[in-house]
């Protein structure tokens, strides 16, 4: 008796319906993403705290998401070989934001650590008591706190989308409520105390690229790292860091970012980055103090 063979019957109509649904969801998610991103921008004013030696001749030089006023004496900065960092502080106005002292400390230290890693790409970074060709200092002039509840909802929505709609290749944007922002002013002075570079920097978190952390200082902490990277590039290259293709970090900088020893011992004062643990913590939205131990002086 011949065996019967049962072939699978395709259902083109069902496949077309599923494809159409996926396409519709993709288009809808994209439209929502664009709308939320356009609406989801905090404000980062370019305030002045009076810490700079001079504000003359500062000119706008904005990036895609960053606003700055800056100036640099290129030849003098490029001639410098050694540099030291005075720890970042908060202005009186920025200090009114209801961060705890530990939260402010993490934000300021994140800026200094990022500065030190970036400056080490060209300069020899020395300790605070040593002589240096340039001395760098930054002041936080404005900060807006993150709404941790809104970030928590955003993280939950992202997880739900990945489970319920895995075929829709559009990321879930962050809820554009309670976005944080950060502004700083910074300068580099030579051994005679003369200003050789200055920058007023402001940037706000946005719903598309900043996933957020469940902490009041979450956005400020992340933005402080971006500031340190931008200001160090200004001094390393002697020109605006914006409008250029990104350069690959050196092996030393990459190793330090992953939690290894910094290129110069002076950078140890700002502690080591949390490395892969910090990256994972950022991805799932953990508060900065869950993964970052802060400055070395605070490590017990």
Image (spheres, grey):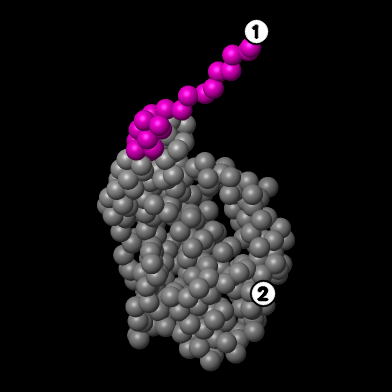
Q: Residues within 10 Å of mark 2 (few under 14, many from 20)?
A: many
Q: Percent from the top left, x then y, of residue 91?
A: 40, 63
Q: Residues within 10 Å of mark 1 (few under 14, many from 20)?
A: few
Q: Name the residue nearer the viewer: 68 or 97.
A: 68
Residue 117 placement: quadrant? bottom right
Q: Percent from the top left, x then y, of residue 249?
A: 62, 68
Whether residue 79 is visible, yes or no, is: yes
Residue 232 placement: quadrant? bottom right
Q: Residue at x 37, y 77 (%)?
A: 61
Q: Residue at x 63, y 74 (%)?
A: 121
Q: Residue at x 34, y 38 (%)?
A: 20
Circles 2, 1 touching at the beta carbon (< 8 Å): no
Question: Which residue is denoted by mark 1 in the rendering?
Answer: 1
Whether residue 130 is visible, yes or no, is: no
Question: Which residue is denoted by mark 2 in the rendering?
Answer: 126
Q: Tell me the magenta residue range.
A: 1-22
Q: Percent from the top left, x then y, of residue 11?
A: 42, 27
Q: Name the residue nearer the viewer: 85 or 41.
A: 41
Distance from the alpha carbon under mark 2 to that under mark 1: 91 Å
* Earlier-in-chain disc, 2 versus 1: 1
Q: What SS does tag 2 mark? A: loop
Q: Count the marks: how many?
A: 2
């Amino acid at each position: 008796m011949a065996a019967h063979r049962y072939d699978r019957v395709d259902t083109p109509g069902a496949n077309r319906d599923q494809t159409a649904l996926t396409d519709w969801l993709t288009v809808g998610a994209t439209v929502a993403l664009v709308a939320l991103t356009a609406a989801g921008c905090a404000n980062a004013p370019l305030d002045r705290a009076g810490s700079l030696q001079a504000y003359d001749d500062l000119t706008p030089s904005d990036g895609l998401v960053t606003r700055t006023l800056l100036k640099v004496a290129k030849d003098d900065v490029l001639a410098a070989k050694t540099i030291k960092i005075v720890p970042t502080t908060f202005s009186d106005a920025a200090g009114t934001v209801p961060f705890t002292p530990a939260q402010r400390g993490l934000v300021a230290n994140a800026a200094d650590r990022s500065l030190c890693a970036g400056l080490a790409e060209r300069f020899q970074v020395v300790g605070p008591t040593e002589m240096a060709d340039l001395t760098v200092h930054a002041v936080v002039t404005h900060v807006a706190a993150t709404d941790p509840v809104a970030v928590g909802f955003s993280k939950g929505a992202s997880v739900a989308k990945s489970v319920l709609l895995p075929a829709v290749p559009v990321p879930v944007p962050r809820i554009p409520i309670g976005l944080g922002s950060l502004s700083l002013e910074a300068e580099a002075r030579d051994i005679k105390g003369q200003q050789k570079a200055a920058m007023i920097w402001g940037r706000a978190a946005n719903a598309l690229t900043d996933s957020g952390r469940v902490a009041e200082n979450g956005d400020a902490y992340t933005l402080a790292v971006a500031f340190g990277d931008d200001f160090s590039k200004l001094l390393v290259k002697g020109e605006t860091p914006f409008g250029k293709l990104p350069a690959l970090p050196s092996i030393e900088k990459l190793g330090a970012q992953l939690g290894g020893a910094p290129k110069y011992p002076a950078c140890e004062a700002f502690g080591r980055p949390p490395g892969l643990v910090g990256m994972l913590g950022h991805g799932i939205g953990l508060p900065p103090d869950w993964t970052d131990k802060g400055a070395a002086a605070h490590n017990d």
